[in-house]
Image: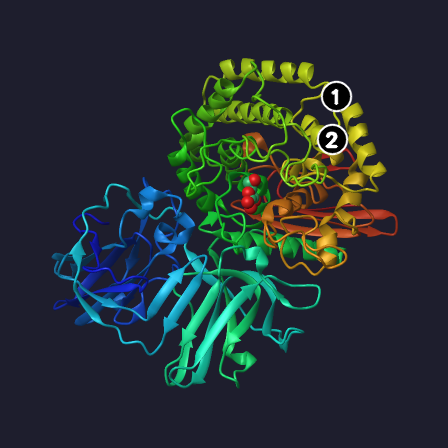
Amino acid sequence: MITNAEWISSPIDIGEVCPIFSKDIKVSKPIQKAELSISATGVYEARMNDKRVGDFILAPGLTSYKSRLQYQTYDVTDMLENENTLRICLGKGWYRGRISAGDKVINETDGAVIAELIITYNDGSAESVITDNSWSVRTSRILFSDFYDGETYDASAECKFIGTADINTSISKSSLILQEGENVTEHEKIKPISMFITAKGEKVIDFGQNIAGYVALDLTANKGDKIVISHAEVLDSNGNFYNENYRSAKSRLEYVCCNGHQTYKPFFTYFGFRYIRLDECPRDIGIDCFTAIVIYSDMKRTGYIETGSKKVNKLFENTLWSQRDNFIDIPTDCPQRDERMGWLGDAQVFAKTASYNYNTKKFFGKWLGDLRAEQRENGSVPDTVPNFWLLSRSSTAWGDAMTIIPWQMYLMYGDKKDIEVNFDAMKRWVDFMTNDSLDQYLWTCVDDSHKMWRKHYGDWLALDAPSGSYRGITPDNFIASAFYAYSTEILIKAGKIIGKDMLEYEELHKNIVSTFKKTFTEYSTQTECVLALYFNLTDNKAETARQLNDMIVSNGNKLQTGFVGTPYLLYALSENGYAQTAYSLLLQEEYPSWLYEVNHGATTIWEHWDGIRDDGTFWSTDMNSYNHYAYGSVVDWLYSVAAGIKPVEEKAGFKEVIIAPVPDKRLGSINVSFDTSYGTIKSAWHYEGDKICYEITTPVKATIIIDGEKHIVENGSYIFK
Ligand code: BGC
């Protein structure tokens, strides 16, 4: 709890050096409990008697700071001695780093920390220690730290006393909230697989996996020795270090050694990388000095998939990695370049896959709080949350995160509160589309050209884009009206779950659907067919499905879809009689396809289908991330169609389950296990010659559908041949 503490800042400007705020605390009686609460305008690391308090990396985390700034509360009972020193080091983090530079309101405040330690003694008395002007301020050895640009640390720098802290009244205490999200913590620790000299003569280390996190150093050196590290995701076609796709993010680590044995890992930054280049280092430095540490929100893993195809298994692994690397307190588009934004479209597209892989209830619950906080008066939501770039637009498929994600949370975890807290915001989003449109019952806008930054992003990165454009040719008005229908449908279902009268919206939905059908009578892109099928906007599903299937088959079993069409593409096929074609796309190995990336050495999901071309050249330097989870959304089709594990809307949270596997001999087998709060659901099938053997375990009542035949069963394990 933070009630009496004041925000405190350094009394003088110390430039880029991170300050340390400290306070000596004496304890004279036996303690029953001691709780320390901390927040910061930046990121902090607290140490009690030189021991780290808690394991949250980059606390207090990322929220829409203007109205929601988290604080953490730590139990420090066992850390206290008779004489103690509490130190809190402060970095710029998201709040004041280059990442939020567009957001002037945030930048106006100086770096500050606020903390309150409440000690309850065995005799029942209590005492609190608060940040105030009795705290002292020193310089730290962190000379520079920024998410985009990296960190500079001088291990032999002297920590100078600056003075006592100033109370900072420019920052409000009213936006402080207790931490809502998961802790961001350290996870996998990866040793390098090789160190080599490239054609250009550069010393490069390969960790074998594209990650988000940082490199830890462990070495013996002389004072003044320097290690300078650059980060990269890929090597170029000549095997040289390549990080032009980081754009302006310098992603540079500089460590100046002290004498003797020492260890270091960055405090207030992280990088997206697989390779590091040693731009400077002691000549005899060995590979063993380096360990890559992966950081991400500490979600519980729930989903496991193994198939008969090594390459599909690798695709699944890559998707897990892109989720870990981009679930660092908020869902980001990518972890490496000068972006790392909470793009709504990317999160919306991936939320279903993410919540089969891991329990995302708390993670998305917190971020939805920020989405609601950023919703504008007229119901529109910015394209990124937090809205660091002060984007004023609101776009189809991106803004629909406001309806799609709460609904997804409800389906997966069955908690009506996820609907209750979001319902009003969901409704306001739908109302915004209604009010914003030129035509009644559609969401149309002034012109439907393919200008890049107009209103919508279209079928972002689709392959039917005109040359030089990022936007596929599916018209904005088509996509926007389709999502308008879909969001309204979700709103109705959600409203009914919490007992709202949804008649008005049912009427609206009916009108949207009929107007859509009258307006968009023909489809000319894969994405148009996909949306019409998946959102139930075509009167003739059989014909639309046939058309989609023809488009794909005549294109050599290859997709052309982007961010909008891809997540639903395999569903649109498999739910309408073309499961074989869905599998052909899944198993396609030529460009463009999921396995093309696997064949080209991907260890995460790429932003572009052609991130690396067959001839080894790159898509561009401009917007080419190798760690963008959006297309990893194919994984939810593996869980819910290939293995067939689907929630029942009326019994959400897997209180009951539908298990309707769709096998294909080319995949050979699948073995999925998925942990729910009712127990573990397992669905596996494999081929024995031409016969298929299904093995299903359900902890709850299930409707198992095999070959169109329904079996209603109680919990247990079942085999079907
Ligand atoms: C991001 C995307 C995002 C997009 C908006 C890009 O720069 O990386 O993933 O959704 O902008 O179109």
| Structural crowding at the residue carrying mark 2, measured as other residues with C-alpha within 10 Å and reported as few (<14), some (14–19) or many (≥20) | some
Badge 1 amino acid: Glu
**Displayed quadrant of residue 565:** top right
**Residue 184's spot in the image, x, y percent?**
43, 56
**Residue 204's spot in the image, x, y percent?**
59, 73
The residue under the point 59% across, 40% down is: 349
Look at the picture and state if 55 lies above or below 340. Answer: below
Q: Nearer the viewer, residue 471 or 379?
A: 471
**Residue assigned mark 1:** 522
Q: Nearer the viewer, residue 698 or 77?
A: 77
Q: Which mark is residue 525?
A: 2
Element on which disc 1 rests: loop
**Residue 440's spot in the image, x, y percent?**
56, 13
The residue under the point 77% across, 33% down is: 708
Badge 2 amino acid: Thr
Indicate the quadrant of ligand 1 in the picture. top right
Q: Tell me if residue 271 can be seen.
A: yes
Q: Which mark is residue 716?
A: none
Element on which disc 2 rests: loop
Q: Nearer the viewer, residue 456 or 409?
A: 456
Look at the picture and state if 504 lies above or below 409. Answer: above
